[in-house]
Structures are given as structure tokens and as C-alpha cells.
Image (spheres, rainbow, N blue to C red):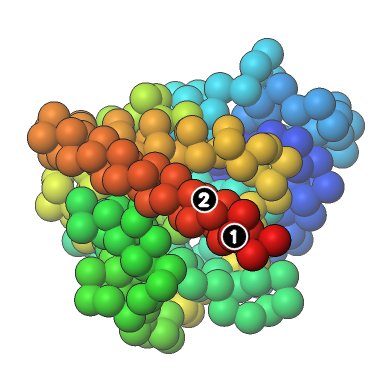
């Protein structure tokens, strides 16, 4: 049995080095190969890989192709029975990978499995959610989720009551570390390249479950995820634009034009709420100051 570890990176040289060191310090017991697709990082990531990890199959992209497309480049070359989709800002521990492999070996109805994620300080990182719905998106966009996080729609979407302390079937675990069967990728297709970033792993999970496979979370395997390091270097406006575009693509693809129209209406209402708040604040300062 062979495992293919697939990592996509942009501008995370130091964290990627820690990630690769952890993989080779605590490798799986089976034969494995490691791919890194570098999306034209300006920090010398690709040169570091060539110098310090010559055993890694490096893909040098001339531009930032995004997460989905770069992962698909690796999938096209991978020879493993299982694909381990791994973020560059993660670190595995002894047994982390083997536990996931053993889980898929023993649970033939499982198409994907994800580990428990830990923050940099070792605390629990919440990593499982339900599939997004129009209601959940409305709660988020209209600030209801932030004001009343205990509302039933948001609680179901965020899995707020789930303590991440037991093996259970879930909809969409965070894409920081996912083990998936190659046979499933061959059947349903790889990541949708229509997503540049955000919702790409949600879409893959949705299609896996639609094809009749189950997705599991197991706390038996633990992986540290430092989290959000690359995207923090982008402007909030750009991130918001990419997130909205990916959200729209997901809902149009799976629920049609009516869902997309509903999202446009929610976005318009959000803009009106923001303008109203700005106007009220402006009038308040004009009146009292």
C-alpha cells in the first residue's frame, strides 16, 4: 500500500519546513510519496524544498493557482491508494498518519477521515461543521450568528455542541488534514478548479457524501494546525471577495440560480444594514459632538 501526501503552499516557508520535518520524523509505516505544489511563493519556499528536502516531488507554479487547482496537479501525479491532503501550516505527531490509514482500512464505507486539530498551544481547534445552507449563510451575513450564536440554524451549521471527543460521522471537517481514497477521487473527480480558495473542500465533501460514502472525524489521531498563516497576509477586502465568489459558486452549483438570487438579496440587505449603522453613528456624533 502506498500513500500520497499532497501539500499546497504559498509564502509559508518556515511553517512548511516544520511540516515536512514532522512528516519525515513521524512517517507512516507504509510506502509514501510527498508532493508540494508551490504557488509562486516570494519567500523562497521552492528553493528551500529543493535544497533541504530533495526527496519531495516539487511542482513550481509560475503564478498563484489557488488551493484547488494546485492540489489537482498533485492528484494527477499521485500513485497512492490514499491521498493525504495536508496544509503547510500543520505538524503531525507519532502515529497521526497511521491511525487515519488504519481507519480507512477498517471502515470500508468511509470515503474520508479527518483527525482532531490542535492549536499552536495544544488546545482544541474546532474543525467540524455541517454543510452550509441558505439559512446559515443568512445568519452569518446579517450578523445574527455573531449576535445570537445559540440560534438553532447557526448551532447546527457550526456544530456548536460537538466536543470533538468521539469518532463520529460528519459533513465537512476542516481541510487542514484529510485522508481520502484515490478511488473516490477517480470516480467523482478532484477538486473543482472553479474555487480559488474557500468552499473547495466543502464541495469535495458534499460530492463524496452524495456519491454514497461516509466522512468521519476521529480524535484518535491528532495534528497541530497553526492556522490561517498565509491568508493573514492578504487584505480583508480581497479575502471577502474571494470568499463571496466561492460561496456563490458552491450554491449555484448545488442548488441552482434561485439559491444564488437569494444570496444576492441577503448581501444587499447586509449592505443596507451597514449603511444604516454608519448613518446612525454619523448622526449621533453630529448631534452630540
Image position, residue 98 (x, y; %): 52, 65
Image position, residue 167 (x, y; %): 35, 79
Q: Which quarter of the figure is the C terminus placed in?
A: bottom right
Q: Residue at x 48, y 33 (%)?
A: 242
Which residue is situated farthest in the front direction here? 287
Q: Alpha-carbon neighbours of circle 2 within 10 Å: few (<14), some, or many (≥20)?
A: few
Q: Residue at x 73, y 77 (%)?
A: 121
Q: Is residue 48 above or below residue 31?
A: above
Q: Is residue 286 above or below residue 238?
A: below
Q: Nearer the viewer, residue 29 or 262?
A: 262
Q: Residue at x 75, y 28 (%)?
A: 41
* Residue where numbered disc 2 is placed: 278
Image position, residue 203 (x, y; %): 30, 42
Whole-angstrom CA distance, mark 1 to mark 2, is 14 Å
Q: Is residue 38 left or right of residue 127?
A: right
* Residue where numbered disc 1 is placed: 287
Q: Nearer the viewer, residue 251 or 33?
A: 251
Q: Secondary structure at mark 1?
A: helix
Which residue is situated farthest in the top direction here? 62
Q: Earlier in the sequence, mark 1 or mark 2?
A: 2
Amino acid at each position: 500500500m502506498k500513500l500520497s501526501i499532497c501539500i499546497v503552499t504559498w509564502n509559508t516557508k518556515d511553517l512548511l519546513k516544520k511540516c515536512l520535518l514532522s512528516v519525515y520524523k513521524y512517517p507512516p509505516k507504509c510506502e509514501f510519496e510527498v508532493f508540494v505544489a508551490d504557488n509562486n511563493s516570494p519567500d523562497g519556499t521552492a528553493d528551500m524544498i529543493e535544497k533541504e528536502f530533495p526527496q519531495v516531488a516539487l511542482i513550481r507554479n509560475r503564478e498563484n493557482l489557488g488551493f484547488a487547482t494546485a492540489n489537482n496537479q498533485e492528484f494527477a501525479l499521485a500513485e497512492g491508494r490514499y491521498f493525504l491532503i495536508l496544509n503547510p501550516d500543520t505538524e503531525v505527531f507519532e502515529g497521526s498518519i497511521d491511525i487515519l490509514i488504519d481507519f480507512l482500512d477498517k471502515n470500508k464505507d468511509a470515503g474520508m477521515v479527518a483527525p482532531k486539530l490542535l492549536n499552536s498551544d495544544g488546545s482544541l481547534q474546532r474543525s467540524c461543521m455541517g454543510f452550509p445552507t441558505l439559512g446559515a449563510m443568512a445568519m452569518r451575513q446579517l450578523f445574527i450568528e455573531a449576535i445570537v450564536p445559540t440560534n438553532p440554524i447557526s448551532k447546527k451549521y457550526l456544530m456548536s455542541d460537538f466536543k470533538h471527543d468521539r469518532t463520529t460521522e460528519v459533513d465537512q471537517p476542516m481541510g487542514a488534514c484529510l485522508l481520502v481514497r484515490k478511488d473516490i477521487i477517480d470516480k467523482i473527480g478532484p477538486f473543482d478548479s472553479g474555487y480559488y480558495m474557500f468552499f473547495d473542500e466543502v464541495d469535495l465533501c458534499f460530492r463524496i457524501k452524495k456519491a454514497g460514502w461516509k466522512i468521519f472525524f476521529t480524535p484518535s489521531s491528532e495534528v497541530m494546525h497553526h492556522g490561517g498563516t498565509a491568508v493573514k497576509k492578504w487584505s480583508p477586502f480581497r479575502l471577502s471577495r474571494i470568499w463571496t465568489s466561492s460561496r456563490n459558486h458552491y450554491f449555484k452549483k448545488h442548488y441552482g440560480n434561485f439559491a444564488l438570487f437569494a444570496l444576492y438579496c441577503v448581501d444587499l440587505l447586509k449592505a443596507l444594514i451597514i449603511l444604516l449603522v454608519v448613518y446612525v453613528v454619523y448622526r449621533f456624533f453630529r448631534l452630540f459632538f
